[in-house]
Image (cartoon, coloured by chain):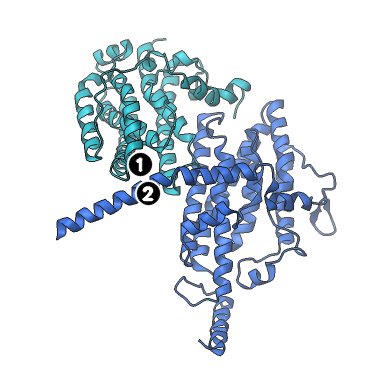
């Protein structure tokens, strides 16, 4: 493929949105209140919309009658390039919020820069997404504060989630060969440049939430290279169920 | 207030309704009117919220990204309907917590249709086409009902329901124009959803306990049997376009009446499900109760946080 790097680069961004949208989709109808249910579904819908724009662009680059659905549903696990953070389960509402918050702060910084990419399609998708992601970040940040500085129980639950999910944050800034190549070409973003800013912003919110910033220095990575946690197979089993069971049909 | 005064107020009240004036929350209303409306509006709100579950069941397995987004948006609309119906209900002097309590304890009912399982993707089509179709027939007259907040909520609900119905029919159409397997999936869904959809229009007129009073208050404009006939007459030709068959050997057009004659509805099944013994009553209720119980610490935290913030503001001001 002519645009191999760009194609793979798009997937590293879009797969995060797809898998997080899928995780949030599991919660629909099961939230702690109707209002949070609606808000989380909204976020899921935003991410899904972004995913579709990215995949449609990737399908165009790939040619050969490729479609957004082929890309979404018909890859093997190792070809999904999302980070490990977004595939983590909805253990409880604290985890849902923790995962969202740790991702949103990164996501906002990423697409803020991506808006200025010389690749017009990527820039346009980022421009459209920035307002949505800014809302996601406000929503999840506010809930981190509510739960962290709420009751004893909520504080413990929020702290548990942050402590547990912290080990997946470093991977966000790990640069794969594809990312390096695209950054070098000036099209992609060097995510390592805003790592420090990310931890500063996250720590600030955690402190405001009366939570402890984890000191853990051991991190897990692999998703961006296609090596996922045990959760991923189950996510794909549901995601791909229809397309795998009834191949080559229109829905 | 003396009996005479109450009677006088009641007369004025009934006269307003018959002049098609809207009753607003702060207006005087007979206690029975208030209670009946709390019952009906909350039952409607509960149906929206429980109704999220059978469709929510397919969000993670939707067959394409477009369908996944549409389904998510649809289930979200239902949450929104629940929200404004609960709000309309709250204007009658009952809290959302009390309403949930009634749902969770089994005191309040919700539409029995949601106690049937969604076992294939075609069920997403059949629910939109048939269940939302029957709901619209029930609900359109409510846009002109006498209680203002309910009538206004229903205007919005009906607009969205009609969109959902077209979306469901379009899923069925796509399946019926697809492969043999897809068409069989559509037929199977129709077989399972047809009779329960007819039951959604309520018991036959002879068995319906609330009809007369509801007619007077414009909570109802037509009887259950009239609505059912209207639903059948409009839906059978749609099945013909799809090229699938209603699971009713007695269904045929009656030239004399201009309506479709249809077979006997299994009312024993209807009452079994209403009484809590349908295929998914237990699952639906435990999903709702679990969501509420598991969310308690979250709601408590939000309240505690809001109180802390309010105290901080007071401390700052003083």
Q: Secondary structure at mark 1?
A: helix
Determine which residue is flagged by label 1.
Answer: A153
Q: Residue at x 30, y 15 (%)?
A: A179
Q: Which chain is cyan?
A: A
Above or below, A125 relative to A226: below
The label shown at residue B305 is none
x and y, in percent, of residue A185 in the image: 26, 14
Q: Is residue A248 visible?
A: no
Left or right: where does residue A148 sit relative to residue B67? left
Task: Find residue A49 and report its image quarter.
Answer: top left
Q: Do we see residue A233 in this rendering?
A: yes
Q: Is residue A123 left or right of residue B287?
A: left
Q: Nearer the viewer, mark 2 or mark 1?
A: 1
Query: Label 2 lies in what chain?
Result: B
> Foreground residue, B37 or A47?
B37
* Residue A78 percent location from the top left of the image: 45, 13
- The correct choice, above or below, for A221 with respect to B114 in the image is above
Q: Quadrant of the N terminus of chain A?
A: top left
Q: Which residue is mark 2?
A: B300
Q: Number of marks in the image?
A: 2
Q: Colour of chain B?
A: blue
| Disc 2 crowd, CA 10 A, few/some/many (<14, 14-19, 20+) | some
Q: CA distance from mark 2 to mark 1?
A: 9 Å
Q: Contact (CB < 8 A) between labels 2 and 1?
A: yes
Q: x, y (%) of residue A136?
A: 34, 38
Residue at 54%, 70% (x, y): give it: B34
Q: Chain of mark 1?
A: A
Furthest residue in direction front, as rendered = A152
């Amino acid at each position: 493929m002519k645009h191999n790097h760009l194609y793979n680069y798009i997937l590293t961004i879009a797969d995060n949105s797809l898998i997080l949208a899928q995780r949030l989709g599991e919660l629909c109808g099961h939230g702690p209140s109707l209002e949070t249910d609606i808000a989380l579904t909204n976020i899921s819908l935003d991410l899904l919309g972004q995913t579709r724009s990215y995949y449609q662009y990737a399908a165009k680059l790939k040619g050969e009658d490729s479609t957004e659905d082929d890309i979404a549903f018909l890859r093997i696990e190792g070809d999904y390039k999302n980070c490990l953070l977004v595939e983590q389960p909805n253990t409880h509402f604290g985890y849902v919020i923790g995962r969202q918050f740790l991702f949103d702060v990164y996501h906002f910084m990423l697409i803020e820069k991506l808006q200025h990419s010389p690749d017009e399609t990527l820039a346009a998708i980022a421009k459209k997404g920035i307002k949505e992601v800014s809302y996601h970040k406000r929503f999840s940040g506010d809930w981190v504060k509510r739960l962290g500085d709420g009751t004893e129980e909520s504080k413990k639950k929020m702290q548990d989630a942050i402590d547990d999910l912290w080990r997946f944050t470093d991977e966000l800034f790990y640069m794969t060969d594809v990312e390096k190549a695209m950054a070098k070409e000036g099209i992609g973003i060097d995510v390592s440049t805003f790592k420090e800013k990310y931890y500063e912003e996250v720590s600030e919110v955690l402190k405001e939430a009366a939570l402890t910033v984890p000191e853990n220095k051991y991190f897990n990575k692999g998703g961006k290279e296609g090596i996922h946690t045990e959760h991923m197979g189950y996510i794909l089993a549901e995601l791909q169920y229809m397309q795998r069971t009834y191949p080559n049909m229109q829905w | 207030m003396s009996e005479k005064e109450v009677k006088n107020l009641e007369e004025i009240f009934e006269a307003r309704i018959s002049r098609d004036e809207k009753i607003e929350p702060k207006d005087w209303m007979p206690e029975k009117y208030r209670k009946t409306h709390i019952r009906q509006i909350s039952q409607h709100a509960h149906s929206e919220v429980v109704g999220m579950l059978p469709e929510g069941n397919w969000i993670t397995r939707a067959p394409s990204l477009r369908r996944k987004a549409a389904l998510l948006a649809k289930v979200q609309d239902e949450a929104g309907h629940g929200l404004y119906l609960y709000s309309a209900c709250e204007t009658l002097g009952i809290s959302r917590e009390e309403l949930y309590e009634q749902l969770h304890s089994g005191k309040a009912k919700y539409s029995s249709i949601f106690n049937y399982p969604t076992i294939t993707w075609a069920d997403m089509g059949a629910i939109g086409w048939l269940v939302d179709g029957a709901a619209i027939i029930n609900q359109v007259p409510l846009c002109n009902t006498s209680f203002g907040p309910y009538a206004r909520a229903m205007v919005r609900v009906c607009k969205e329901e009609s969109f959902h119905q077209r979306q469901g029919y379009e899923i069925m159409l796509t399946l019926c124009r697809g492969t043999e397997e897809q068409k069989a999936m559509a037929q199977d869904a129709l077989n399972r959803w047809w009779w329960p959809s007819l039951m959604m229009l309520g018991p036959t007129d002879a068995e319906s306990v609330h009809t007369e009073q509801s007619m007077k208050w414009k909570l109802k404009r037509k009887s259950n049997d009239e609505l059912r006939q209207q639903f059948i007459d409009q839906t059978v030709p749609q099945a013909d376009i799809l090229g699938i068959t209603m699971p009713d050997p007695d269904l045929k057009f009656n030239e004399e009446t201009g309506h479709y004659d249809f077979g006997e509805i299994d009312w024993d099944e209807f009452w079994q499900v209403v009484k809590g013994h349908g295929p998914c009553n237990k699952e639906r209720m435990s999903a709702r109760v679990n969501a509420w119980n598991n969310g308690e610490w979250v709601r408590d935290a939000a309240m505690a946080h809001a109180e802390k913030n309010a105290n901080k503001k007071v401390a700052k001001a003083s």
